[in-house]
Every structure is written in C-alpha cells, then in structure tokens.
Amino acid sequence: MTKSNSFFKNLKNINKFINSLLEQNLNKLKFDNLKNVASNNKIILTFVALFILFFSYLLAPSFYKQEDISKELKKELLNKFNLDFTFTQKLNYNFFPRPHFVNKKSYIIKNQKKISEIGKLKIYVSLDNLFSTKNISINEVIMENANFELNTKNSDFFIKLLDHNFLKTNLNIKNSNIFFRDSENEILFINIIKNFKYYYDPNELKNILVAKNEIFNTPFSLKVINHKDEKKIFTKLDIDFAKLQIENIFNYKDDVKSGSAALLFNKDKSLINYKIDKNLFEFNYSNELENKKFMYKGIFNFKPFYSILEGDAQEINASYLFGTNAIIAELLKTEIFNSKNLDFKLDINANKIKNNRNFINLFLKSKIREGLIDIDDTQIEWKNNSIIKLTDTLIFVKDGKLFLDGKSQINIKNDKNIYKFLLTPKNFRKKIKIIDLRFSYEFGEKVIILNDIIIDGKYNQKVNEKLNNIYFRGSNMQNKIFFKNMMNDLLKAYAG
C-alpha cells in the first residue's frame, strides 16, 4: 500500500469516527439541552483536532528526505551498538503499531568486510522529536533473516555487543543463521538463531543477552551477562531434551584467559576448568565427588586445527556417542568432518559399559583425519574370556543412518568358560585361539552383518555359509537363548 493511499484511508476512518460521535449526540438532542449539546460538540471538535494533529505528527517522518534519515539512523546505530550499517534499498516508514523504519536488504560492515547480510531490518524510533531528523532516537532494532559470517578473528562479535548501552534501546535478532568458518573459509558449523535479545536488566544493573538457538539439530537456550567491572562473562546454557544445564564464568582480565563451568546432567554435577591462550584451548573435566567417577582432559588448537581428548571413567554410556541421535551421528550428518584440514583424536578408557554387564575394560581409540573417522585399535573384553580388537574401521552416514564397517580380531583367553556359558555339547568343543572376521554394524536398528570368518588362520566354508542365513539384530543378540543357539550352530559347522 502506498503512503498516499494509507493517508486517505486513515482520513476516511477519522471521518467515520466523527460522524459516529455526532450521530450519538444528535439522537439525544432536545430543546431543553441545546446548551449541553453545544458544549459537548466543542469537546468533540477539540478532541478530533488534537487527534488529527497527533496523526499528522506521526506521519511527519514519511516526508523526510531518504538521504537525511538514512544518514541519521546509520549514525545512531553506530553510536549505540558500534555497528556500521549499509542500506541498499529505500527506507520505508510505518507508524503502526509504533513508529519505525523498514529496510529489506542491508549489511553490517566490520573492518571493511561484510560480516552480515540482513533480509529485513526494523528500526523503531522514539515518539519524541519526530519533526526533526537530527534529534531522532532509536529505542529498538529488529533484524530478521540475517546471515552472519564469523571466524576465529571475529568470533566474539555477539559478546562484544554487550559492551554497548542498552539502557533505553533493545536489539533483537530473529530467524537468522551464524556461519562459522575455518582459516580455509570452509564452514565448520551453522548456528540457527531462533531469537537473540539484548536488553538492560534494572535488577542486575547489567546488559543481558538471552537467546534460543539450534546447532547440529540440537535446540538450546542461552543467557549471557558481561560483568565489565570484574572483566568476567557469565553464561547459562540449557539443553532441555538432554536435561543438561551449564553455568560458566569466563575471566578475560589476563592475556591467558581462563574459566570454569559447572554442569548439571540428570542431577549429576561435574566441573570443567579451562584456559585459552591465543589459538590454544585446554581443559580438564571431572565430577565433583572426591572419588572421581571420570576424568577427561583435552587440547584444541585452532590454527592449524587439531584436537586431542583423553579420559578415564568407571562407566561410559556408549549411546551418547553412537546412538541414533547421538552427537557423533549428528556431526556426521552435517558433513563437518569432511574437511581435509581436520585432525581429531579421542581416547577413552572405561571399566564398564552402561546397561551391558557382559563387556568390560573398553579402550576406545578414535581419530578423524582427512575427512575420515575410524576407531582402529579399539578393544574391549567379553567377561574376561576374550579380547575383541578392531582394525580397518570406518564410521559413516548413509541414507540418514550411522554405520560402522571394519575388521575384528577376537583373542580367546578362556575357551572353557565360553563353552560353559554357551552350553556347547562336548563333541563341538574344539580348541580355538583367534577368530578374524569382517563386519558391518548399523547403530540405529542394531543390525550386524558378519562375513569372511577365519578361525586360527583358516577360512571355514561351512561356517561362512551358515552366517549367510543368519540375521543379527540387537533384540535377538540380547536374547540369551537365541544367542546361544546361534553360536552353537556355528560351532557345530566348524567342528564338522
């Protein structure tokens, strides 16, 4: 709708309003109260005159010169937020529901580079001094459908915004994206902004950032407070679906930055201490109990990028790493690991596997290099009776499902206990030392395919033919009767 059409439409509405008031009063008209009617009409006309004047006042900015209002708004935005905006299209003015200017394509420039492209920018102005472009005052800014380009050099962009004055001005960012790139300009991850809001909290006497985001298909909420006097930043992160809450204090007073974070996960509390020195991030992570259930430590180097994480735990929940919706699966789906510059190593030792009493003493060794992820040299024990070691492995996503392909070598430590557990008939109990095989495992459905079985260095045709007729699914493997019958059928084929 054009401004002239909008203006005439509003005049018609005012005319209808006046007629309605006059009609109501004329219906009450009597000769004995003409004086009252005359008095009432004066009040009505005064009210209408004031309304038209106020309406005209609201319309005043629509007559501003584009060059003048653009210059003043850019100046005001730079003063308040230290943000250098560029408007590529005409600024449109609306006074409903409150006076504001709209621009449908704009940019934010930082260090002579475009840091953000904004699909829709709304700049709300104060009702004071609408007749003067030079005295116009911004009280709220809303960015929608914006794309922010960040890297290690400007990664603190959103935190630095907290340094500015939000006492009388709010800043909102909605339905936008943050693209974080590495030194090679490749995208490491995308943070989806549902809603960012910067405002001044009179209770805290501080600027506050509250945000609702999503990263790797994981929604989370965030609260940030910058204590400038103490040079500390407080953050509170909530990941509702995982029942995880993290409260962090970050100290940026010294050259080597440091911090500590308290994690509350399913009522279990743990603590992370860390420090940041230029491109290096180091941390250690443990629970708060004196008798440590776990202890992890790690190093992240960002230029060039490499990472080493090591840990020891009494018990580990493997589903957090390799479940259908676990972090490994979600990261693989984003293709973040496809970067050839990525070098990542993770080693974890755990005494037990949660919800699985048969497997103990896990030594998980994993690495990501040149876009590939494997868990070569990982090993685990089965009831102290055998050691299973993995080689030539590859973890990948296909059709939205997480797979593990590789080879396995099983060293039999106590075949007597294994035969006893399986209730194997004595005539099938041949001495076995080493079993080599190839496998493919789908984590979501817990389906495993075995082939190319070699027993003590020899390929057995009967055993491999038997495997072709067996479908291994997690629910079946957990069924002791099915598992024992299946294993005894293979042992029978091997014994001949």
Image: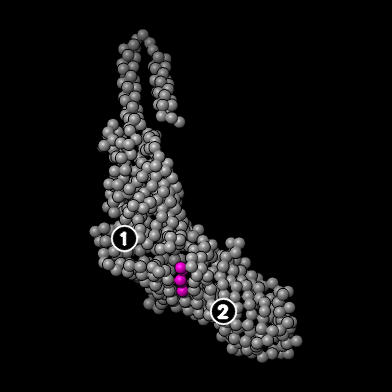
Residue indicated by mark 2: 391
Q: Quadrant of residue 401?
A: bottom right
* Residue at (33, 39) in percent of width and height: 70
Q: Is 258 above or below relative to 415? A: above
Specify the segment rendered in magenta.
341-345
For this orientation, the residue located farthest to the right is: 496
Most foreground residue, 95 or 87? 87
* Residue at (54, 69) in percent of width and height: 322
For this orientation, the residue located farthest to the left is: 229
Q: Secondary structure at mark 2?
A: strand
Residue indicated by mark 1: 233
Measure how far apart labels 1 and 2 are at the Cα level.
45 Å
Q: Looking at the image, do the residues carrying marks 1 and 2 touch, with CB atoms under 8 Å apart?
A: no
Q: Main secondary structure of the magenta part?
A: strand
Most foreground residue, 159 or 230? 159
* Residue at (30, 57) in percent of width and height: 226
